[in-house]
Image (cartoon, helix red, strand yellow):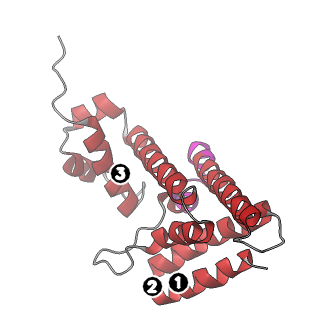
Amino acid sequence: MPRPQEFDTTEALHQALGVFWRKGYEATSLAELLTATGLSKSSLYATFGSKRELFIAAFDTYRQDRASAAHHVLEQGPVRPAIDAFFHQLFASVNDAEPAYGCMSINQAVELAPHDPEVRQRVVQDLQLMEDLLTRTIERGQQAGALTSPRPARDLAKLLVLAFPGLQVMARAGYSPQQLDDSLQLLLSHLDG
């Protein structure tokens, strides 16, 4: 009879996510994952299968959490402040003692997606979801008169998605919150006519 599981799988997954997010997939060792999760090697393999399967499960957890947060921010309240808040989340931790880790999906667009079709598909889905959410939000703002750009909402959303990785890189490179906000406000000025 197998022994009952003596750990919280969700907690272990979140601990592994922290390591993968901070270091990336390739630079994360099995020893670091075992330390972070508190699991034995046999428990990790029995529960998650492999380092790669653990990474995919952790990445999917991250993606679900971020999609839920994006829906919550972009579909609530006045449009312009919602879009502003969505982008400000990117660099909310810039002044923290820890370095900014950026968006894990953007990080993986660079690290694994070029040679891993499964990760590439996830990254593309994430960017498409962002574009779709922003399109709906911009359409809502245009219909209400809060956003006055005559450009189609989809075009404006594509522009915002295009700038998203750039803002991530700027945050990770150490730009100040003021510099990031100045760049964001310039970007968001395209929403006005």
Residue 54, image x and y in percent?
A: 38, 41
Residue 87, image x and y in percent?
A: 54, 70
Q: Are marks 3 and 1 in contact (CB under 8 Å)?
A: no
Would residue 31 be found to the left or right of residue 117 on screen? left
Q: Amino acid at mark 2?
A: Pro
Mark 1 closeness class: few <14, some 14–19, many ≥20 residues within 10 Å: some
- Magenta run includes residue 111: yes
Rendered image: mark on residue 152: none
Q: Is residue 42 above or below residue 169?
A: above
The residues colored magenta run 108-121
Q: Which residue: 59% across, 84% down?
A: 183
Residue 175 visible: no
Residue 127, image x and y in percent?
A: 63, 56
Q: Amino acid at mark 3?
A: Leu
> SS class of the residue under badge 1?
helix
Pointer 2: what residue?
177
Q: Is residue 121 above or below residue 184?
A: above
Residue 60, image x and y in percent?
A: 47, 44
